[in-house]
Every structure is written in structure tokens, then in C-alpha cells.
Image (spheres, rainbow, N blue to C red):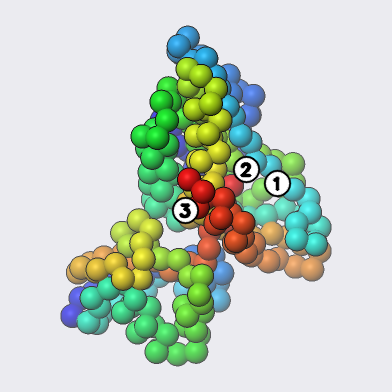
């Protein structure tokens, strides 16, 4: 398991390739990449700032990964999340899951993102044409996490 | 009486103008801290929001989570990462 919370940009292609580089028993890699959009909730977004809770954020992500590893037979899980200032088009989050067969990787990746969205302490503040605003939590994210 | 450290994040941190503060009181559970703060003044009214989230010692918890001397409690709005 690798959990990284960092201000630096990352290369999603590199991260996906690294998921199976050291293990030829890996038959499936599912990689999710979340990007900053230039539009959200009716407003143009020029960029955002991602706040986190140093210490707790890393622990919360590790806990989610452990739970995924208990539910599915996984060979490798990497979670990478950026913090600080981000511009539209930049990747925010990468979740990579490697397993012998695809279904475990698909399901675990989906599970990790649903839990990350509702349990990992990150908060987005968007710069919009009408000024900065905090993004509000969505009920649909709660419902998505509830199905697991 | 116990002493706890209380931390705030995101919109709460900004509106309170405060990252963290230390409190002392008869706090059996996290909700006792929250109620004591709400009683302190209008600026803490946001801690009465229905969707408030909280953590004890860097783990998400519910408001009925028991507290001990020296615990770190955090209050924050719903998380929005990913």
C-alpha cells in the first residue's frame, strides 16, 4: 500500500504503469484519476485550494485501503491525493488497484473513491468569477458510500 | 475536568478565525465540547449545523464518542476531496 498526500503534481500514466511493474501476478490494474474541472455548480472555476488535516488525512486514507484489502483479494493499492493550489485540468487524485482478476480491482477502486469522498478530511475551496467559495458536501456522495 | 485541544478546518476555521484552541471542562463525550462552544457565543453557532463532522485523536467519530484527558477533538464541515 502506498498513500501519498502531496502538493506536487503527478503523472497518472506513470502511476498506472507502476502498479504492475514489480509483480507479474497482477492480471488487472484499475486506475481512477480525478481532475479539476473549470466549471462547477453553475460557476466558472479558475482554480481551487485543497485543505487537509495533516496526520489524520493520511491515517484515514490508509484505513480505507486496509478495509478494501479485507474485502477484496488485492495485490497492490496506491492512493495519491494532492493538496494546496490546483488549476483546471490538473489531476487531484489517483487511486490505483491491482489484482489477479479485474472484478476485484474495479470494485475496490470504486469503493475506495466512495469512501475517500465521504471520510477523508479534504476540503475544496474554489476560485470562481464571483469570488472564493467552499465546495459543499453532496448527498449523492453519502448515498454512493452507503451502498458498500 | 479534562483538558482537550479543539481543531477547526475549512469553512469553520475561516469563520472562527481560529485553527485550534484549548478547552477545559466536564467533557464526557465530544458533544459536551461542542455544546460548551455553542454556549460560548454566536460565532460558534456553526457547530450546531446538522451535517457537522467530528474526529477524536485523528479518527472520525460520532458526537457520543467518549473523551479522555489530552484528547484532540476536531470539528469540520462535510469533506469534499477526490
State left or right for residue A49 relative to residue B79: right
In the image, farthest residue toward the front: A147
A148 is higher (above) or lower (below) than A50: above
B61 is higher (above) or lower (below) than A47: below
Q: In the figure, residue A70 lies in which quadrant?
A: top left
State left or right for residue A60 relative to residue A11: left
- Chain for disc number 3: A
- Dot 3 or dot 2: first in sequence order is 2
Whether residue A25 appears in this view of the structure is: yes
> Are discs 3 and 2 less than 8 Å apart at CB?
no
Q: Mark 3 points at which residue?
A: A119
Tell me the element at label 1.
Answer: loop
The residue at 39%/52% (across/down) is: A56
The picture places residue A148, in percent across and down from the top left corner, at 48, 45
The residue at 55%/22% (across/down) is: A102
> Which of the two residues, A41 or B5, is positioned nearer the viewer here?
A41
Q: Mark 2 points at which residue?
A: A92
Q: Bin the neighbour count of mark 1 within 10 Å (Cα to Cα): few under 14, some 14-19, many 20 and up.
A: many
Q: Name the residue under label 1.
A: A36
| Same chain shared by disc 1 and disc 3 | yes
B79 is higher (above) or lower (below) than B76: above
The residue at 55%/76% (across/down) is: B15
Distance from the alpha carbon under mark 1 to that under mark 3 = 20 Å
| Same chain shared by disc 3 and disc 2 | yes
> Are discs 2 and 1 less than 8 Å apart at CB?
yes
In which quadrant of the rendered image does the N terminus of chain A lie? top left
The picture places residue B39, in percent across and down from the top left corner, at 39, 89
Amino acid at each position: 500500500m502506498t498513500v501519498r498526500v502531496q502538493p506536487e503534481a503527478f503523472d497518472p500514466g506513470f502511476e498506472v504503469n507502476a502498479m504492475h511493474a514489480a509483480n507479474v501476478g497482477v492480471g488487472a490494474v484499475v486506475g481512477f484519476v480525478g481532475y479539476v474541472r473549470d466549471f462547477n455548480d453553475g460557476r466558472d472555476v479558475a482554480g481551487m485550494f485543497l485543505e487537509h488535516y495533516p496526520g489524520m488525512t493520511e491515517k484515514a486514507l490508509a484505513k480505507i485501503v486496509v478495509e478494501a484489502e479485507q474485502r477484496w483479494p488485492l495485490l497492490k493499492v496506491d492512493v495519491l491525493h494532492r493538496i494546496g493550489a490546483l488549476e483546471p485540468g490538473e489531476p487531484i487524485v489517483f487511486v490505483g488497484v491491482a489484482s489477479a482478476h479485474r472484478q476485484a480491482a474495479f470494485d475496490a477502486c470504486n469503493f475506495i473513491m466512495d469512501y475517500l469522498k465521504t471520510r477523508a478530511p479534504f476540503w475544496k475551496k474554489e476560485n470562481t468569477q464571483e469570488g472564493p467559495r467552499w465546495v459543499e458536501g453532496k448527498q449523492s456522495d453519502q448515498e454512493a458510500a452507503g451502498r458498500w | 475536568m479534562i483538558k482537550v485541544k479543539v481543531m477547526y478546518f475549512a469553512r469553520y476555521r475561516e469563520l472562527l478565525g481560529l485553527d485550534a484552541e484549548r478547552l477545559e471542562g466536564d467533557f464526557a463525550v465530544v458533544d459536551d465540547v461542542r455544546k460548551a462552544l455553542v454556549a460560548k457565543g454566536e460565532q460558534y453557532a456553526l457547530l450546531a449545523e446538522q451535517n457537522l463532522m467530528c474526529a477524536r485523536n485523528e479518527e472520525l467519530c460520532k458526537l457520543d464518542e467518549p473523551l479522555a484527558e489530552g484528547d484532540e477533538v476536531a470539528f469540520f464541515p462535510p469533506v469534499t476531496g477526490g
